[in-house]
């Protein structure tokens, strides 16, 4: 059996040239303009921060620069999700750090990348945090260690959930009973029965992003851990009965029950939300950050529906779970300004800063106290909902080789959901490619 990368060898040369061009443009337009940012003017030290720089980020950076005027200034390298996929961001950062450049001081990583980027990150002494680590959510801090060393600090956390169209569900005579069940996490068994009822109304039922990417692995992980909570405690083996049943469940939603439209096999985050809105689908698996898309949808599609949030379904006899997401901050080991970089990170973790991140950008706080602040929670009632989800969250396995394994699993899972290969064939291919150290070239 040929490893996956050989199947794409004919396109490899072209893809590599294209990626090199993207890297070159990135350095010319983004990195080079920041070369002068490290020149020290008297006592002023400028540090460079690479991230998706949202409006909330901009507000905080401006505030920091005002407070530290004459001492520290933050410049940015913007890697917006609108221009770079998560995988592209990962590769751009990896290549920049591999060159040992001192032009990036702080960089943001998906929490699942921490082990891969640890070799380029400066370990953080907990004594320098002045007890900050004790104020952070334990499940957000859990992703920040490598070989017992603290190598990252969480900026915000994420948790998977389900959106639903209340206005559509109200067409059912027992809507109130259904909504109560949804709010307490409906069982998958009852959810499928509901889907069969909703078919008669002609609306697409359940959208989950099933493109070959990390979002698909999150859905698969939730089902695996619903079926076998201790699955990752026994090593990584995706070619077994539990994974077969979990992947088969996702396949059946598309191929057998037809409760998820085939188009979902080409959806990632934003595209799944867009389809959910414009096609009047009833349910969508997503993340809190999808709400940032809502204003765009209202304008683009003159959307007037009512969207609410609920926990994801769970299998009968198991407990509801959701996968953690989120982004952490790391200090480059090649930075000449590590002390100043840590000062900026601590600023971002202040209570007022975390409030701004949530108020302006919808980023879930990593400070425990904000979920316990009665006046803040009274004003932002969704925090109570999110706290309940976070308490039932699960992590994907923390592995140095995780992204390679995930790429392989996502590629073959997507092919199975499309109906191009069987579930057994998909998992056999996954096992062979993982064992042979192959990579998937997309």
Image: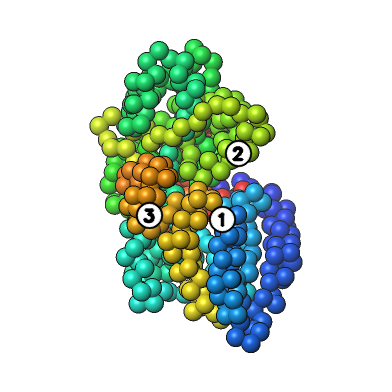
Which residue corresponds to the image point at 63% horizontal and 38% vertical from the top-left?
296
Which residue corresponds to the image point at 57% horizontal and 37% vertical from the top-left?
294
User: Which residue does the numbered mark 3 point to in the structure image?
Assistant: 370
Residue at the extreme front of the image, as rendered:
375
Which residue corresponds to the image point at 69% horizontal and 49% vertical from the top-left?
11
Q: Determine whether 254 is above or below 52 in the image.
A: above
User: Which residue does the numbered mark 1 point to in the structure image?
Assistant: 56
User: Toward the viewer: 218 or 402?
Assistant: 218
Percent position (x, y) of residue 106?
54, 69
Q: Are circles 2 and 3 on residues that touch, CB within 8 Å?
A: no
The answer to whether residue 416 of the structure is visible from this angle is no
The answer to whether residue 417 of the structure is visible from this angle is yes
- Alpha-carbon distance for marks 2 and 3? 26 Å
Q: Residues within 10 Å of mark 3 (few under 14, many from 20)?
A: some
Residue at the extreme bottom of the image, as rendered:
42
On screen, residue 213 versus residue 313, left or right, reads right
- Alpha-carbon distance for marks 3 and 1? 17 Å
Residue at the extreme left of the image, as rendered:
317
On screen, residue 336 versus residue 38, left or right, reads left
Percent position (x, y) of residue 87?
57, 53
User: Which residue does the numbered mark 2 point to in the structure image?
Assistant: 295
């Amino acid at each position: 059996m040929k490893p996956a990368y050989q199947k794409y060898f004919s396109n490899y040369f072209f893809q590599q040239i294209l990626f090199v061009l993207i890297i070159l443009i990135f350095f010319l337009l983004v990195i080079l303009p920041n070369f002068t940012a490290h020149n020290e003017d008297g006592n002023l030290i400028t540090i460079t921060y690479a991230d998706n720089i949202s409006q909330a980020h901009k507000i905080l950076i401006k505030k920091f620069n005002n407070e530290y005027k004459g001492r520290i200034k933050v410049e940015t390298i913007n890697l917006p999700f609108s221009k770079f996929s998560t995988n592209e961001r990962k590769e751009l950062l990896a290549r920049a750090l591999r060159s040992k450049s001192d032009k990036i001081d702080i960089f943001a990583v998906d929490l699942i990348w921490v082990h891969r980027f640890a070799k380029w990150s400066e370990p953080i002494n907990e004594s320098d945090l002045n007890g900050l680590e004790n104020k952070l959510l334990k499940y957000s801090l859990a992703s920040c260690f490598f070989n017992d060393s603290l190598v990252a600090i969480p900026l915000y956390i994420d948790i998977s959930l389900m959106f639903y169209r209340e206005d559509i569900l109200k067409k059912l005579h027992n809507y109130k009973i259904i909504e109560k069940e949804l709010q307490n996490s409906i069982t998958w068994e009852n959810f499928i029965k509901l889907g069969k009822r909703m078919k008669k109304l002609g609306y697409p039922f359940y959208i989950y992003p099933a493109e070959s990417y990390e979002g698909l692995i999150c859905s698969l992980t939730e089902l695996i851990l619903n079926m076998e909570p201790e699955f990752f405690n026994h090593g990584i083996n995706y070619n077994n009965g539990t994974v077969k049943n979990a992947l088969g469940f996702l396949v059946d939603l598309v191929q057998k029950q037809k409760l998820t439209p085939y188009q979902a096999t080409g959806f990632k985050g934003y595209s799944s939300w867009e389809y959910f809105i414009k096609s009047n689908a009833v349910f969508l698996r997503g993340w809190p950050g999808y709400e940032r898309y809502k204003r765009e949808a209202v304008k683009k599609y003159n959307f007037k529906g009512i969207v609410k949030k609920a926990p994801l379904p769970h299998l009968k006899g198991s407990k509801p779970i959701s996968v953690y997401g989120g982004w952490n901050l790391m200090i480059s080991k090649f930075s000449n300004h590590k002390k100043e970089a840590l000062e900026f990170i601590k600023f971002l973790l202040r209570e007022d800063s975390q409030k701004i991140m949530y108020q302006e950008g919808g980023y879930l706080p990593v400070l425990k106290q904000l979920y316990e602040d009665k006046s803040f929670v009274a004003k932002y009632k969704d925090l109570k909902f999110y706290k309940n989800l976070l308490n039932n969250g699960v992590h994907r396995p923390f592995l140095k080789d995780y992204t390679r394994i995930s790429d392989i699993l996502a590629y073959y899972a997507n092919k199975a959901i499309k109906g191009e290969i069987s579930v057994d064939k998909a998992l056999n291919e996954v096992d062979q490619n993982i064992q042979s150290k192959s990579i998937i070239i997309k």
